[in-house]
Amino acid sequence: MNKTVFMQKAIKAAEKGKGRVYPNPLVGCVIVKDNKIVSEGCHEYFGGNHAEINALVKAGTKAKGADLYVTLEPCNSYGKRPPCSQAIIKAGIKRVFYAVKDPNVLKSRETLEKGGIKVYSGILRDKAKGLLKDYLKHLKIKPKVSVKAAITLDGKIATRDYDSKWITSVKARNYVHKLRSEYDAVLVGTNTVLKDDPYLTSHGKGKNPVRIFVDFTLKVPKKYRIVDGSAVTVVVYDEKLKNIPKHLFKKNIILAPVNAGAAKRDFKVIIKKLNGLGLKTILIEGGGEIISSALFSSAVDDIFLFTAPKIIGGKNSVSFAGGKGVSKISEALSVKNIKITKIGPDVLTYGRLRTAD
């Protein structure tokens, strides 16, 4: 067997992850020793081990002195997982062959070569690129953050007892379910999870987004749907926490530590973390505090505001945008390019705020 045949095997292995890894790339890997394949691996699902790690684990001690064939250049930075470049060096791989250079990876080749590994690229590049077209296209997308909220005529998203089901009509909610499918991820805060126990899916209106919830103190217990492991879920929490609840260590749960103090001052800290995970388009559906934090951190591109012909009233009911707010009208955020659409008995107001950094 020659190098082309081995890379073809890696491409075939990559195909096993179809439909489960987006927005991550489809990647396959084979490890070869004495001209024989000793293991194969693929990136199985978003948030899971990279193909190289899966192949190295299967190969065990047989990886020492072997060749590694992979469809995409190995990663060289800490994201959801430690860098594959370091794992490859540690395993004692002798040579690395990759088909396509990853424009999102820096100095991987240099790291591998410094580790004593010979590196070759370009084998079956065009064929491997066919598997990676969605990923490569996704890398070019400018990060986008949107806010969606359902409010009453007096700007409330819930009563004083936090009852919010349902403010808007079935037609409006179906619109939102479809809207979710157009985003990589949907984000909410701890209070929304604890009060509503949401699914955060598209309800069959399209692909399901990755679920994200911000829980700095990790107080959401295991009984809630969002931590059941049934769908890919990112948990944003304070990096200072050392004791992570056991129910968060399961398939489909991705832990995303951030500096909570910095994130509370500037919501873009969270957005940057999520973009680093490959989540470029994010729909915020959180409560008033999360929405306010994102809006007044200048982190939001546009807004979808569904207004129902209802009035809740009361100073203790929950407002659409919480937080401290501004002290002067001149400090108010301006929403531009307004478009208004009637959806059943409700009104959708769409507008732009600013382009995200």
Image (cartoon, grey):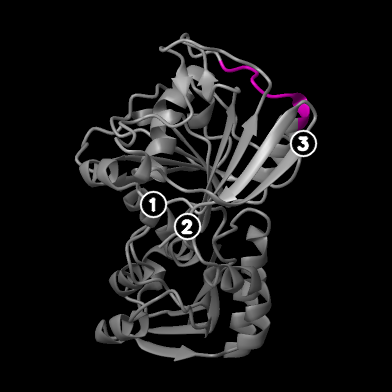
Determine the residue positioned at 45% across, 65% down.
Answer: 59
Q: Are marks 1 and 2 in contact (CB under 8 Å)?
A: yes
Inspect the magenta stretch and tell me whether residue 169 lies in it.
Answer: yes
Query: Looking at this view, is 120 or 75 the one in front?
Result: 75
Name which of mark 3 and mark 1 comes first in the sequence.
1
**Considering the image in quadrants, where does the N terminus appear?**
bottom right
Determine the residue positioned at 67% across, 71% down.
Answer: 12
Name which of mark 1 and mark 2 comes first in the sequence.
1
What's the amino acid at mark 3? Answer: Lys
Whether residue 31 can be seen here: yes
Residue highlighted by disc 1? 298
Point out which mark residue 342 bears: 3
State whether residue 288 is above or below residue 311.
below
Which quadrant of the view contains residue 247?
top left
Q: Which residues fall within the magenta stretch?
A: 164-171
Name which of mark 2 and mark 3 comes first in the sequence.
3
